[in-house]
Image (tube, rainbow, N blue to C red):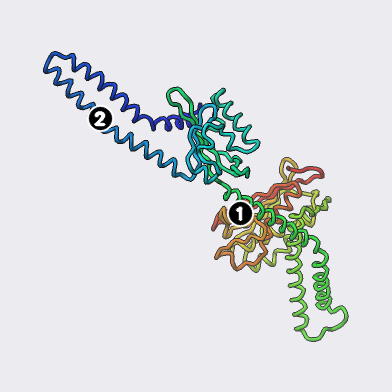
């Protein structure tokens, strides 16, 4: 029997301590009266009489408390909104409070002397017997003092959900069980409603992801046409376009088209990943060529933000086995974020290193606004955007970091992020570089 259970048994027995003390005082008073009757000395008689008077006073002071306590506790038990059942060791009902009629339809006298199984439904009847028998035989309290959900049977036969909690008390060598049944049908209905809402949300989200994944061709095709024709206008393939403003407008069309295409690509890619339909196309690529291409792509952005872009690549990485498009997407999103959220006149460092276990480590560090733990959780959630006075001027979809993490995990790699508000962010990506090698 563990300490918590001992305390429960003891706390139940303490209700009887005052009555036991009264009985003990009565015995002492009777014994003292007999002694006084046989005492010949007046002095001794006076002493014994004083003791008797003190004991009588103690007994009188306790008796009203005992009588009031009995009425008080009976009132509590009969007025509580839970069903309270007192049963013997054989699980026969000795007492049940009147609320049973309201919750289960039985009058108290209808269940007195019956086994508690009369209140239970189906499998819970057999299980309850097994729990009680096991406890009596082994002393291991599997259900004593531990709340659990059970299905009770209403007098009408209707199953009703309750929370059952059982405690034990021992009186005059006999074991008794006190069970409380709390009506939880409202809680159960709320749980069922929440479960249905969750299922509906998951289903709707999957339908959205499936829809967007299927829309890949329909969205990209017209955008590619806009970008292609605007480029033709810029280069004046079919002769002089005329006014210079037309060339300027054509460049705006191409720039906006490319920006929109990148946005659509991110949305479609994350939707494909969530729908389980994104497939990597892996092959051996020259890593230095990929880095050189991505690095030069972001030099204008770094210059416009007054940030210095630094690449640290002490050892040549060489050829690695990856999805080249996904790798460029990972690098572009990480470098773009680092530049956007860096403070002016600071560095964004791209640190590249081959690990001993033939894995590639890519670290992107910035010296910028950083994020708190709560903000990191938001930033790593799809479409999550950190709301901060320092970052509100930077537009985005909130897909960059979640997409990077998903693409890394699809490669069997590892993605980790550390950040400190006001100091900056460090993101580390580890990718396997050989065919058929994955970290997880």
The circle on residue 58 is: 2
User: Along the line of sight, which residue is nearer the eye, 34 or 384?
Assistant: 34
CA neighbours of label 1 inside 10 A, class few (<14), some (14 to 19), many (20+): few
The circle on residue 405 is: none
| Secondary structure of the residue carrying numbered label 1 | helix
CA neighbours of label 2 inside 10 A, class few (<14), some (14 to 19), many (20+): some
Disc 1/disc 2 C-alpha distance (Å): 66 Å
Q: Is residue 196 left or right of residue 39?
A: right
Q: Is residue 433 left or right of residue 155?
A: right
Q: Is residue 360 left or right of residue 169?
A: right
Q: Residue at x 77, y 84 (%)?
A: 244
Q: Residue at x 83, y 53 (%)?
A: 281
Residue 315's spot in the image, x, y percent? Answer: 73, 48
**Corner quadrant of residue 38:** top left
Quarter holding the C terminus is: top right
Residue receiving disc 1: 377
């Amino acid at each position: 029997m563990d300490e918590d259970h001992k305390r429960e048994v003891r706390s139940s027995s303490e209700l009887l301590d005052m009555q036991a003390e009264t009985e003990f005082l009565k015995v002492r008073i009777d014994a003292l009266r007999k002694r006084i009757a046989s005492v010949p000395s007046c002095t001794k008689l006076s002493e014994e009489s004083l003791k008797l008077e003190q004991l009588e006073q103690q007994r009188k002071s306790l008796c009203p408390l005992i009588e009031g306590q009995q009425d008080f506790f009976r009132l509590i038990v009969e007025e509580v909104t839970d069903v309270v059942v007192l049963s013997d060791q054989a699980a026969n009902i000795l007492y049940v409070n009147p609320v049973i009629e309201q919750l289960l339809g039985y009058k108290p006298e209808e269940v007195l002397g019956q086994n508690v199984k009369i209140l239970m439904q189906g499998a819970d009847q057999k299980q309850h017997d097994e729990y009680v028998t096991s406890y009596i035989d082994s002393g291991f309290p599997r259900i004593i003092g531990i709340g659990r959900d059970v299905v009770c049977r209403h007098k009408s036969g209707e199953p009703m959900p309750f929370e059952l909690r059982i405690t034990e008390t021992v009186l005059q060598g006999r074991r008794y069980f006190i069970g409380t049944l709390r009506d939880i049908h409202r809680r159960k209905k709320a749980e069922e409603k929440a479960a249905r809402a969750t299922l509906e949300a998951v289903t709707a989200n999957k339908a959205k992801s499936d829809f967007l994944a299927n829309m890949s061709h329909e969205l990209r095709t017209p955008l590619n046409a806009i970008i292609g024709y605007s480029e033709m206008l810029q280069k004046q393939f079919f002769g002089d376009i005329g006014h210079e403003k037309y060339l300027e407008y054509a460049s705006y069309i191409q720039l906006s088209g490319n920006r929109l295409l990148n946005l659509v690509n991110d949305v479609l890619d994350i939707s494909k990943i969530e729908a389980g339909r994104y497939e990597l196309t892996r092959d051996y690529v020259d890593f230095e060529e990929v880095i050189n291409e991505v690095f030069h792509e972001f030099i204008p952005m770094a210059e416009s933000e007054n940030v210095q872009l630094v690449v640290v690549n002490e050892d040549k990485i060489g050829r690695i086995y990856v999805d080249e498009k996904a790798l460029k997407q990972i690098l572009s999103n990480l470098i773009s974020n680092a530049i956007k959220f860096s403070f002016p006149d600071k560095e964004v460092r791209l640190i590249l290193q081959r690990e001993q276990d033939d894995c590639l480590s890519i670290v992107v560090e910035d010296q910028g606004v950083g994020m708190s733990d709560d903000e990191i959780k938001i930033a790593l959630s799809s479409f999550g955007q950190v709301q901060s006075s320092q970052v509100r001027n930077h537009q985005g979809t909130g897909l960059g970091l979640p997409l990077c993490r998903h693409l890394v995990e699809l490669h069997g790699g590892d993605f980790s992020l550390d950040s400190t508000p006001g100091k900056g962010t460090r993101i580390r990506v580890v990718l396997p570089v050989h065919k058929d090698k994955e970290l997880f």
